Amino acid sequence: MLIRNLVRHVSKRHASNTGLTSTVPKYPPILDLSKEAKKRRERERYRDRINAQDTVEEKLFFPNLRYYYGTKCYYLEESNLPLDSLSFVKYITRTRSIEADVKTFQQLLAFNASEAKELLERIRPYLQEALLFELLGRTKENLSEEKAAGVVVERINDVLLSSLSMQYQHLLDAAVDYKPRLEAFWLAGTFHPSAELYKERSDEIKRLEKENKRKEKPEPIDIDAAEVVEHHIQYIGHPLVQLRSKLPLTQLDTDIVGDSDLEWDKFLSETYYSPSLRFGLQEIRRFGTNLPGFWPGDECEHGLVSYHYMKDVNDVSKSMVEGERKSRLTSQAVLSGFGWLHAQAAFQGFSSYQELTYPLTSQQVITDGRQFSFNLYQLNTMLIHKELNSPNTRSNICISLPIQPLYKGISNNQFVEWNDDVILNLLGFYLNKPQTREGVAMKPFVNPDVKVLAEVDDEDRRIWLHNQFRHMYSNRPRHRLPYEIYDWERIYKIEYSTREMDARMRPYERGQNPMDERRYWDSMPPYIPKKFRPKKKQWNGWRSKFGKTYFPDP
Amino acid sequence: MPRDYYAEVKSANQLNNLSIEGIVRSEGQRRILDNGALKSLKEQGIQVENALDVISDKVVLPKFPLKPMFGVEVQNAVELVEHLSFNDSNVLVSGLDQAKAFTNSIEINSESLNLVTAESDFSRHDLVKRCIKSSLLFDAYQEKLPKRIDPERPAWNFPRDYGITDRRRNLLLCNRMVQLCSSLNPQLLAHRRTISDAPFRVLLERDGVKVLLSLRADILLTSSEELEGPSASIDINENRKDEDVPDLHPLTSTLSLVKEVTPVDQLKDTIPFVDGFSRSNIHTAIFHFNSTETANIHDLDVSQDQFLSRSLMKAYAFALAEARRRYGANVQKLPRPVTVQCVHTDSKDFHFAVLQLNTVKDSSETTTDERNFYWSLPIQSLYETCEYSSAKPVIEGYNPSVFNTLLAFCRNN
């Protein structure tokens, strides 16, 4: 026994000698231990964890698992944007908006003028007839302007598809959506702290200073009251009609419209005002949703054209109407383009943390039935937040045409000043053929064997994930009401300390915040009645009463 | 200081007697104790009055007559008319027989209908399948669905489902299928028009009672030429399924219609478009069956027979409106029959039917020769199952003949 141990000991020492004799030692990497660097590394780990998820659904599911009651976010609805919000919208989407002329626009679309003119001659009578009928021929009462515009858009799309589909295969293969659910959720860049956050931080500094006075050896205070913050943005769009195809649109040749605007680049790299101070927006809690109108699994997952409603500006004073109209239209174009493409990119496996590996393009028409605004959007970057290793040099681009009226008016059942350019632009959008991207991996971060949830082999896990994912995305309220600080507590305990002798039982008195600390899975798993459990002879612990959960490792 | 009765309780018996009534009684009999105040006041020569004498004088308050806050002066009072009404939320209780009696129709064998089905030249059924999938499975809408009820244990509360409502399912599927039809037939662009969400109101008289049919065609296809009646090329007498209109006695054909009161000026026919436009002959009406919207007036589920009767009622209303549009509001005898095709669907089952309107009159007013002809194809299912089965989107048992029939209906000239 002793000899054997001795031999083992000697052989071990012998083996370890080789490490000692090697010339190149291996040291662990030297890491930057500053607060910012640590945060950046943490975010990179987080990104890697999202990328490690197999399917698209799991990637969409994962970021919402941090909070039980949802993530705090600013809620932007297409029909209800704040006043004068263009700079804000450009900032949160990292977009340069460029107004182009018709020639450049057609060049970008690789527009074949002679072919389109030929089609135009064929389509015009049908289109005019259909529009005249919708505008004058219908006896419908109490139809809101938005619904009327929706009907006109449906007719235009109907006539164009009917006359072009047999000639152009990509239009026959395109899927048409009516009033789809468009939602996008992302993390946006550096903002000044809100007044509440600033006060909270200053109070904390004061408290620490007070504590330090009592201590023999004061500790350094590592809080900056003016430190910049990030915000999550939830965008809800209301497209009237959208067309989708299996293949993506080709990349725009953005060199045509000129070099990057230096002023905008500077603007995009600077810090923006707090949205709550600047626009009076309120943060809400919600599970972030990324949906381009359909669930993952639909084969037509790239957008072609989407129509949006151009709402008239009637909530501002007369002097502001013109400026506000223009600003709101551009904001709408930028947000709808970004929101749609962001959700599409999320279905390709990218996120606010994982940069795109190829650009995506979409085409938007914003109209009230008479006036048309045409926009092209190209998504180049999805990283808009502040924790970046190197400054983001990419920016998204939105190219728009000035507003064009389709006609001036109607008299004697005839259109006055009918504008063919609008139809030509529409034709340009429809004839823009989607193509395969040669040599580009479309889903580099999705497991090629298990692209969507339906392909997961484990049946229990698949069903569980499906139900949980749909439940999360329905955004119905959680089972228990969220924790709140009651008014009487705020008055008598927080603002004016009148109840010093009360036991400090409430979370805010103990330095806890359940809204932020409670994770999505911090609840009992579903109870399984005894008759549904497998029969077992011995006691298997109380956990066997509950159903299995498949949350990814936190 | 009021007495604390419960403090005085000494035994269980006492507690038993201590009721609220007892306390009230004893408290009500309390006497005012003489505390010597009256005596000392009199000694000091102060005049004392009995308090009861002071309050015995009753004060009479003046009465204020109540006036209405604002006057309602009725000018040009409109006469109200009581009538029966049939709309999209109702079905006929006796089903198809009642509908036949109401519409004065006899059914003709559906095999006799010469449908030019497009089986030979249409091969892109993958497009139709994609329409079904994207409407019923992949649409991302999540609205609150009706409550699930288990008839075995009706008190059990299921978790509420979120998903695509029946209205939206029907809307998406029909819009996409009709769009596909018109995309496949660009030559029809000059002859057809698509009207979405078209409400009709048709007023008629049955058994001496006014009946208002207010029904909606969710998609209405109109054409440049009048649709020819199928009876022109068919021997009706050989193919008739019914000898005559069914006799409902002792019931009437207006059974289960709802009584309503409407101002007389609103009681008139309306169609969803104005005259003077080309291509406005009603060709095909496509309408939805939404189970959250349409139900019996009694608490019963809608049966298949009632589903079929709804097709006939709607087809009749549209055909009658079309006849009045073509030949005037007071037309009694039709110069040519009016034909309307209809498609009735709940996004799974499709019912195709054709109604040829020969007379606008009631069955009691006409002889057995004057009847409307009704062809009703058997109900076809577009698919057997289309759902997420164990979290996988599955569509099984796709039936291509449904889309072929729809295509044939659209192409029919």
Image (tube, rainbow, N blue to C red):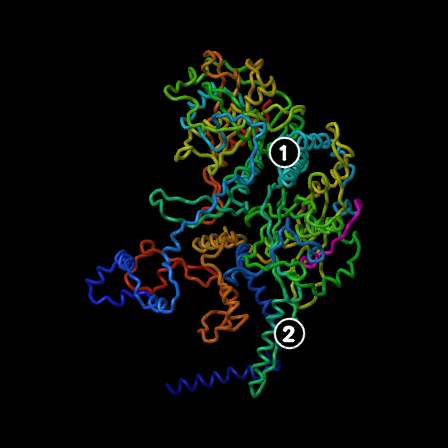
Q: CA distance from mark 1 to mark 2?
A: 63 Å
Residue A438 visible in the displayed image: no
| Residue toward you, B199 or B231 | B199
Answer whether residue A508 is magenta in the image.
no
- What residue sits right under mark 2 in the picture? A224
The N terminus of chain A - image quarter? bottom left
Mark 1 secondary-structure assignment: helix
Q: Where residue B215 appears, x then y in whole percent?
A: 53, 29
The crowd level at tag 2 (other Cα within 10 Å; few <14, some 14-19, many 20+) is few
Specify the amino acid type for callout 2.
Answer: Asp
| Residue toward you, A423 or A518 | A518
Q: Is residue A531 left or right of residue A224?
A: left
Q: Nearer the viewer, mark 1 or mark 2?
A: 2
Specify the amino acid type for callout 1.
Answer: Ser
Please report, as a chain letter, where disc 2 is located: A
Tell me the quarter of the picture where residue B99 sits.
top left
Q: Where residue B59 appears, x then y in whole percent?
A: 43, 49
Residue drawn at point x = 52 percent, y = 28 percent? B262
Disc number for residue A57: none
| Residue toward you, A160 or A310 | A310
Mark 2 secondary-structure assignment: loop
Please report, as a chain letter, where disc 1 is located: B
- What residue sits right under mark 1 in the picture? B183
| Same chain for the residues under marks 1 and 2 in the image | no
| Residue toward you, A318 or B332 | A318
Tell me the quarter of the picture where residue A202 sits.
bottom right
Q: Where residue B241 appears, x then y in whole percent?
A: 43, 18
Q: What stretch of residues is rendered in magenta?
A: A90-103
